[in-house]
Structures are given as C-alpha cells and as structure tokens.
Image (tube, coloured by chain):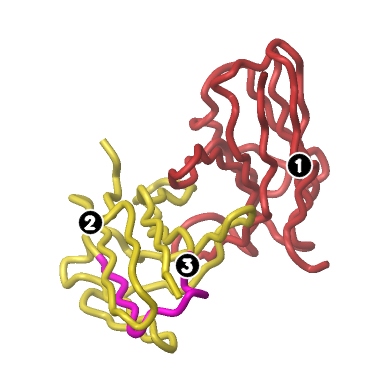
C-alpha cells in the first residue's frame, strides 16, 4: 500500500491543453511538496504547501493543498513541451526522517 | 558546482560483485539521504544521516546494503554481493537542517546501477 497515490499514472496531451494531477492519501500531513524529475536527472522541488486549503501559483502551475491536508493537486494551464517530465508529490510522515514519495505521474506534452 | 554531486553516473556490474556509490552533498548541509528509484516509480527511502550519524537505516532492503558518512560530508553507499533486483537509480539528497518539517531536499542526478 502506497502512502501517497498519484493519478493519473501516465498523461499524454497536446501543447496548449490544460491538465490536473492528483495526489491522495488517507494520512494527514503537516506539509506536502511537489517535485519534477526529468530523464537522467534528480527531482527538483517546485513548491511546498503547508496550510490546509492553500493555493500556490508558479507561472502556469497551480498547486492546492486539501482542506484536511490529506491530498493535493497540481493544475497546469496551457501545457508546453518543456513541462514534460515525471511529477512527484512527497511528504514527511509524522515522526519520520525521510520524504515519502508518491507513485508519480509521467506527463508528455506533444508539440 | 554548488549542487549535489554523485558518481559514477552509470555503473554496470556482474551479479555477485560489490559496488560503491559516492555522494558529495551541498557544502554545509547537515542532512543526507539515500533513495532507490525503480524505473517509472517514485524514489524510496534507504537511509538518513545527520552529520556523521546514521540516524535511520530502516529503508535498507538487506544487510548487503551499507552506508557511511564518516566526516559528515561525503557519503558512500556500498552494496555487497549484488543481485539483479538491485538494478535501479540510486539518488542522494541533502538538506540544510535536520530532517522533517518543510525541509526541501536537494537531489543529485543519481547513479544508474545495472546488474547483469
């Protein structure tokens, strides 16, 4: 059983389309992070959300933390080929030293 | 560079051989983590160091895996008597302070290990 379940697992869309990626859990987290990983590279932090209901925007990317702090979503507007990559949500579980990562969403944006 | 550096980038070994993977964290970072990432999956935690102390090794899959950070900076992950299931990308990450909370982790580009 995965602590963080992401959906969809794979997503292939045309340039200019919008998309949403979901990260769900039955656990409550004090914060949640989103990373993007490109082939052959390590994950790079995009954003950290802390407060239930919080919305953060990073250019065309909008991140939301659920009110109950159990889930999060990433919405991309007008996707570009440069958005292609593996999107990972991650969180620290209470008392744990390490980040738990979600199952990942592999996004391909076709020009 | 100022980022986390891992070497080698690629390692091919025959089943049964021992391998050693190196991580140079960002200078001054207290925390260092090792993760294992299977193809198409998210990284999975292996072990955590706070300075030179290995505070958590709960993710190491077997006693063939061993990690050290003797001087609180460079770390080495060693895998003895490698098996095919050890094939994966091994990621190292560091963070400025102690683990937990909202600490962002800075990742290296990983070592891709292939066991033949």
Q: CA distance from mark 2 to mark 3?
A: 22 Å
Which quarter of the rendering shows the N terminus of chain B? bottom right
Residue A105 at what x, y percent from top left? 36, 56
Say which residue label 2 marks. A24
Q: Residue at x 42, y 72 (%)?
A: A48
Can you say whether A54 is above or below A104 in the image? below
Residue A77 magenta-drawn? Answer: yes
Horizontal side of residue A9 vs A67, given as left or right: right
Give the mark nearest the N terminus, 2 or 3: 2
Quadrant in the picture for residue B63:
top right
Which chain is represented by red in the image? B
Would you place residue A66 above or below residue B93 in this image?
A: below
- Residue A16 visible in rendering: yes
Separation of disc 1 and disc 2 at Cα?
A: 33 Å
Q: Nearer the viewer, mark 2 or mark 3?
A: 3
Dot 2 falls on a residue whose secondary structure is: strand
Q: Which residue is mark 3?
A: A84
Membership of A74 in magenta stretch: yes
Mark 3 belongs to chain: A
Q: Position of residue A90 (x, y in %)?
A: 40, 57
Q: Which residue is mark 1?
A: B75
């Amino acid at each position: 059983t995965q602590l963080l379940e992401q959906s969809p697992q794979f997503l292939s869309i045309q340039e200019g389309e919008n998309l949403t990626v979901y990260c769900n859990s039955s656990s409550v987290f004090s914060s949640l992070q989103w990373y993007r990983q490109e082939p052959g590279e390590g994950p790079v932090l995009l954003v950290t959300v802390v407060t239930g209901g919080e919305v953060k925007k990073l250019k065309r990317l909008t991140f939301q933390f659920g009110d109950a702090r159990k889930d999060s979503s990433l919405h991309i507007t007008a996707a570009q080929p440069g958005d292609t990559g593996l999107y990972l949500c991650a969180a620290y579980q209470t008392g744990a030293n390490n980040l738990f990562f979600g199952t990942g969403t592999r996004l391909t944006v076709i020009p | 560079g100022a980022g986390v550096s891992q070497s080698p980038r690629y390692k091919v070994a025959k089943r049964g051989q021992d391998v050693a993977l190196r991580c140079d964290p960002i200078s001054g970072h207290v925390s260092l983590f090792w993760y294992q990432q299977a193809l198409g999956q998210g990284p999975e935690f292996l072990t955590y160091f706070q300075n030179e102390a290995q505070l958590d090794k709960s993710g190491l899959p077997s006693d063939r895996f061993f990690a050290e950070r003797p001087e609180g900076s460079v770390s080495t992950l060693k895998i003895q008597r490698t098996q095919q299931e050890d094939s994966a990308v091994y990621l190292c990450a560091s963070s400025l302070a102690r683990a937990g909370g909202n600490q962002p982790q800075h990742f290296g580009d990983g070592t891709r290990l292939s066991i033949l």
